[in-house]
Amino acid sequence: MSQIPTYVTGVPNGTEKGLYLAVDLGGTNFRVCSIHLNGDTTFNLTYTKVAIPKNLMTASSAQDLFGFLAKQIEQFLKIHHEDHFEAHIRRRQTVTSPDGYRDEHIFRLGFTFSFPVQQSGINKGTLIRWTKGFDIPDAVGKDVCALLQQEIDLLRLPVKVAALVNDTVGTLMARSYTSPGKTSTLLGAIFGTGTNGAYVEKVRNIRKPIGGEYDKSTGEMVINTEWGSFDNQLNHLPNTPYDEELDRDSVNPGYQMFEKRVSGMFLGEIVRLALVDMLKRPQSTLFTDANSGTNDWKSTTTINPDTGLFKQWGLDSSLMSIAAADGTPELSTLRQELENTLGIYSASFEDAKAFKDVAYAVGRRAARLSAVALGAVVLQSNKLNESNEPVDIGVDGSLVEHYPFFRTMIYEALAAIEGIGPEGAKRIRIGIAKDGSGVGAALIALVAAGMEKNAVPDYLNQLRSEVTERFGATIPQMGMATTLV
Ligand code: ADP
Ligand code: MG
């Protein structure tokens, strides 16, 4: 796994304050929000959300996508922060007057970008590769903050991209800000379009070189695991013909193999491929009856030939949620939904039950694999042995939030893991980090704004590293109680 150091060296405690902007490019949606941190573990949040147009996910140039994002930010500011926006336009003409244009009038923005990036500073990071169906080759290797800032500047918005945030890190920060009690959060995890996790690691356990400056006082750093790409070689992961087919027809065959068995974008597709395979088997009676006499709805089952059932990505995993939630004896909600979303008319009870069973198998496997990822981090942290406190985990994403029993199935699996067991599982506290990405991004933008003020000029850093290299000594940093000999 990539195990990317994030340069975030601590988690918040709930007393942080201020007004920040945050945007989140997730995979399915783009969210823009402003967050007022009240400093008492609460916040006020205003937000808008738009679906990312499919054609922009595979646009020919990065500008198409990032231009669209900047436009959404402009609209948000015009609607929700009109005063600030107008004042900014006025001030721009008055740069020289005392109450004229000043840097602190600019919104600090935390940019949640939920794709693998090589981060080289708090607001700098180059895209390693696209995932989740995105494919815009000319963005790969570029600094995504710069790409967004360019488009923001073209629109002359009063916004500075202050922090680059992975959604998992944002979730971790948000949960730590809002979580009950003084226990700080160990892990932030996403189960949405994709899946990933970020956790607090002891710096002494990190074997990768960590270049550049970071706060060494905590002895900790948040690691972005990129666990979506765990076991791309398939040494451990379960593999079915449906997994193989899904992977073969994806935009990135052989990559994100864990994610392809766990997250929202893929679960519906696995179910779909399994159903299509069942339909091909002569001995299977799924969605067929010779006449209405064999159907308890007294009409013959038919499938609209144009149905999503026969198209790649044609079955959204939210249908699995509906199946899992339908507790009616006749499965009438699910049968209605099969008609509405898949054009399967008059499905019998047995059809619906078969659908529900397949969906359950795929969903339960996903939850159990999710538990493997969460459990691994809990074991690595040794927190179950170190204290009696709860081990706090923040989660976000439509799958974990809306799929019924997803968390229950995760707990079931955690209890079965050696080293955790039923007692350990009880001490693991998994909480939804509601609006996690927004609040988390705001918190990281806050840290970043603080760093701007205390910024050490580059030449000083240069001098420091030269001295270290040549004399093997360290020039003390502000606040360090070392004397140079
Ligand atoms: P993003 O990944 O863009 O941040 P979300 O967390 O909302 O967005 O995740 C969107 C994914 O979740 C989509 O793949 C969608 O199919 C899936 N999804 C949405 N609603 C549900 C649901 N009720 N049950 C299961 N999966 C869902
Ligand atoms: Mg998300």
Image (cartoon, helix red, strand yellow):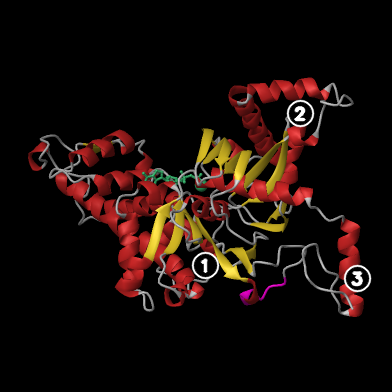
Q: Earlier in the sequence, mark 1 or mark 2?
A: 2
User: Which marked residue is nearer to the observer: mark 1 or mark 3?
Assistant: 3
Q: Residues within 10 Å of mark 3 (few under 14, many from 20)?
A: some
Residue 300 percent coordinates (x, y): 16, 37
Question: What residue did someone put label 3 on?
Answer: 466
Q: Report the quarter where the C terminus lies.
A: bottom right
Residue 473 in view (yes/no) = yes
The range drawn in magenta is 205-209
Residue 345 percent coordinates (x, y): 23, 35
What's the residue at 76%, 66% (across, down)? 211
Q: Which mark is residue 230?
A: 1
Question: What residue did someone put label 2 on?
Answer: 156
Residue in front for this viewpoint, 358 or 318: 318
Q: Which of marks 1 and 3 is nearer the N terminus?
A: 1
Q: Report the quarter where the N terminus lies.
A: bottom right
Residue 145 percent coordinates (x, y): 71, 46
Q: How crowded is mark 1: few (under 14 residues within 10 Å), some or many (20 or more)?
A: many
- Whether residue 213 is situated above or below residue 383 in the rendered picture: above
What's the residue at 55%, 43% (across, down)? 438
Q: Earlier in the sequence, mark 3 or mark 2?
A: 2
> Ligand 1 near label 2 (Cβ, under 8 Å)?
no
Q: Which residue is outermost to the left?
A: 293
